[in-house]
Amino acid sequence: MASVAEEEVDRITRLPAAIIHHISFLPFNDVVKTTALSKQWRLAWTSTPYIDLSLPSAGVVPLINRALRLCTAAKIEKFHLHATASNVRMPAELDRWFGLATARKVEDASLVFGHSCHFVPRILCGCASLVSLRVSNCKFSRDVTIRWPSLKKLWVHDVFLGNHGIAKILRGCPVLESLTLSFLHSTCGVRIDSRSLRELVIKAVCISSLDISAPNLLSLRLWAGFLLVGFRPNGLSSLAEAELNFDKLWSTSVLAS
């Protein structure tokens, strides 16, 4: 006679394939843990198109490497990495992991570090399939080329971007609709020049000056600790809503052309 545990395993195994595959909506670490439930489930998780990685310490890097080598999904819809470990240097692993995502046409990517600041992998900077990207506590190589022809939503947090870096990103995103620059540090002026932008959010510690040219912008939200010289909203003919918050204004003027 089959044991109660065996009967439970049998019930899981007999679930429809569509339901079994729905485990892909779980965080990747939890998806891998489900391999203990049944033989069928052991193989089902490898085809998940949703990969959500947590990196609490350097010790899990070999485990992630082994798990990703087993992934069989022809297309990866989502690839998120949240690393809370401090003093972890792993450029080769980042290139390998996001290389896998790029090769499988990832559309939604996230690279979030809690402590150590890492370079955004070069291969990710040229991912043509990206539609949404979130980066935090990262930096871009000065000589890297940005090529995101499909990107519509970009969220950048705690990344030092001079005006040259912002201009480079905007040139590489011809269809970008939503841009959030959070905890922006820029001692030089910031210029936003885009015909595709519909939504712009800037949360900055300090901006020496801000010049926005975005004729199709519908929503503008700006929070800044200091805006030192001037704010120039140029050609915002489509703007429907705006929220401007400044802690301190030093010789600031608002000029419109």
Image: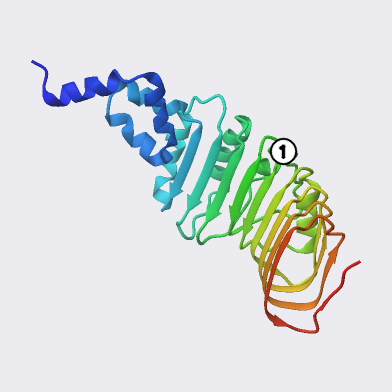
The quarter in which the C terminus is drawn is bottom right
**Protein image colouring:** rainbow
Look at 37% across and 25% down and name the residue there: 20
Look at 15% across and 26% down and name the residue there: 5
Q: Residue furthest bottom?
A: 251
Residue 63 visible from this viewpoint = no
Residue 127 visible from this viewpoint = yes
Q: Residue furthest front?
A: 240
Disc 1: which residue: 150
Q: Position of residue 109 (x, y in %)?
A: 58, 43
The quarter in which the N terminus is drawn is top left
Please, is residue 235 above or below residue 177 in the view? below
Q: Residue furthest left?
A: 1
Does residue 173 appear to the left or right of 56 in the view shown? right
Q: Residue furthest top?
A: 1
Mark 1 neighbour class, 10 Å CA radius: few under 14, some 14 to 19, many 20 or more: some
- The quadrant in which residue 222 appears is bottom right
Q: Secondary structure at mark 1?
A: loop
Q: Position of residue 198 (x, y in %)?
A: 74, 51
- The quadrant in which residue 104 appears is top right
User: For this rendering, which residue is in front, 186 or 88?
Assistant: 186
Please, is residue 186 above or below residue 75 in the view? below
Q: Position of residue 239 (x, y in %)?
A: 78, 58
Q: How many marks?
A: 1
Does residue 210 appear to the left or right of 59 in the view shown? right
Please, is residue 66 above or below residue 249 in the view? above
Q: Position of residue 137 (x, y in %)?
A: 58, 59
Look at 53% across and 56% down and name the residue there: 113
User: For this rendering, which residue is in front, 131 or 147?
Assistant: 131
Query: Label 1 is placed on what type of residue?
Result: Ser
- The quadrant in which residue 74 appears is top right
